[in-house]
Image (cartoon, rainbow, N blue to C red):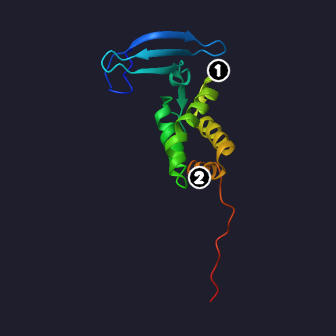
Amino acid sequence: MDMFCVNCFQPKTKVINSRGGMKHASVWRRRHCTSCGANFTTYEKPSVAENKSVLLNDGATTVFNIGKLIVSIASSFGHDKKKADYDSLWLAQTVEDILSTQIRSISSEDIAAITHQTLKAFDDLAAMQYAARHQLITSSRKQRTSRA
């Protein structure tokens, strides 16, 4: 797989140094762009969750898609655009890491519950927005009747 230069978007770069992770399945690479001369670092890890099947509510299955999860998390940060822009990716990666430890198949409910717990640890309001959107919480408010 070719790695694009982060500076000039040249489609091919040269690896000048590479080290495997000691504690985790990851690789650190120092890259050099032969077009613009920029040096940059990449951190690469296998995505185990991307190859997992997800059981949907209607009984159908699909493949896990981190992009959908990022969008779903970002939409929960309506109150803080900066968090939506900057934190949605790493929150989704955290959820993906948790999902990758599960041996059994995963369901959309599992993803929603893990995402909710992850958001709850990070931002209560975003967690509440996410839970409401995914029907993880229900309102116990009773409608008022008007008196004539």
The image position of residue 139, as x and y in percent, is 66, 60
> Residue beneath label 2, please?
129
The image position of residue 87, as x and y in percent, is 55, 40
Query: Is 77 drawn above or below residue 92 in the view shown?
Result: below
Relative to 38, 52 lies left or right? right
Front residue of this view, candidates 141 and 126: 126
Relative to 33, 27 lies left or right? right
Q: Residue furthest front?
A: 37
Q: Amino acid at mark 2?
A: Gln
Depth check, mark 2 against mark 1: the one in front is: 2
The image position of residue 70, as x and y in percent, is 50, 38
Going 63% across and 16% down the picture, which residue do you hit? 24
> Residue beneath label 1, please?
103
Distance Cα–Cα, label 2 vs label 1: 29 Å
Q: Residue furthest bottom?
A: 148
The image position of residue 64, as x and y in percent, is 51, 29
In what quadrant of the picture does the C terminus appear? bottom right
In what quadrant of the picture does the N terminus appear? top left
Query: Is 35 drawn above or below residue 114 in the view shown?
Result: above
Going 61% across and 27% down the picture, which residue do you hit? 97
Q: Amino acid at mark 1?
A: Ile
Relative to 114, 46 lies left or right? left
